[in-house]
Structures are given as structure tokens and as C-alpha cells.
Image (cartoon, rainbow, N blue to C red):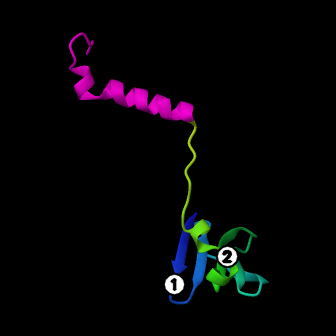
């Protein structure tokens, strides 16, 4: 998903995929959903966005990662490090 915001016209667009929309459905005043002919959602447009929502919540994000995965990545990065591999007593 990609988020586009145009502050000149106060419009927010949530791009949900790479497909080109074939139509649009207005679900509320100034809130439009782009769709394909087979009913897939491709985007959501919100006009006067700053009046309808807190833009800080959509234009920022929090990334939550599984701690076990992070530990495995860190461990494999340390083992693969040329510096660590050159330490005395390390098998190459």
C-alpha cells in the first residue's frame, strides 16, 4: 500500500495495488473507492482529508517485528561479519 497526500488540495490517496481502476464508488461525501471491473479495490481517495481525519496517524507508521526473527537476523549478521570471522579462535 502506498499513501499519497497533496497538501495543496488536501487530498489523501491510499493506493492499494498496481491495477488501474475501471470505476469509482462514492461511499460518503468526498470519500471515493476505486475499483476494477471484477470488484477489486485499487485505491481510496479522501478529499478535504485534514478535516475528516488526523493526518498524523496515516502519514506516520509503526513497524512491529517479531523479536525471534530479529534475533536470528542479528545472529546471522554477526556470524557473517568479516571482522568476526577474522577473530582468533574462529573457524573460517
Q: Residue at x 55, y 89 (%)?
A: 9
Secondary-structure class at tag 2 = loop
**Residue 67 placement (x, y as % from top left):** 55, 34
In the picture, measured across the screen, residue 90 lies left or right of residue 65, that is left
Q: Residue at x 52, y 82 (%)?
A: 6
In the picture, measured across the screen, residue 33 lies left or right of residue 18, that is right
Tag 1 residue: 7
Q: Residue at x 24, y 27 (%)?
A: 82
Q: How busy is the neighbourhood of tag 2: few (under 14 within 10 Å), some, or many (20 plus)? A: few
Give residue 33's mark.
Answer: none
Residue segment shown in magenta: 67-92
**Residue 84 placement (x, y as % from top left):** 27, 23
Q: Nearer the viewer, residue 24 or 7?
A: 7
Tag 2 residue: 53
Give residue 24's quadrant in the image: bottom right
| 73 to 9, vertically: above or below | above
Q: Nearer the viewer, residue 37 or 46?
A: 46
**Residue 52 placement (x, y as % from top left):** 69, 80
In the picture, measured across the screen, residue 81 lies left or right of residue 33, that is left
Amino acid at each position: 500500500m502506498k499513501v499519497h497526500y497533496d497538501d495543496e488540495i488536501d487530498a489523501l490517496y491510499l493506493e492499494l495495488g498496481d491495477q488501474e481502476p475501471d470505476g469509482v464508488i462514492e461511499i460518503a461525501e468526498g470519500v471515493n473507492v476505486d475499483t476494477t471491473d471484477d470488484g477489486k479495490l485499487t485505491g481510496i481517495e479522501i478529499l478535504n482529508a485534514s478535516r475528516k481525519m488526523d493526518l498524523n496517524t496515516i502519514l506516520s507508521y509503526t513497524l512491529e517485528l517479531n523479536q525471534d526473527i530479529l534475533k536470528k537476523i542479528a545472529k546471522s549478521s554477526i556470524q557473517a561479519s568479516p571482522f568476526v570471522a577474522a577473530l582468533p579462535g574462529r573457524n573460517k
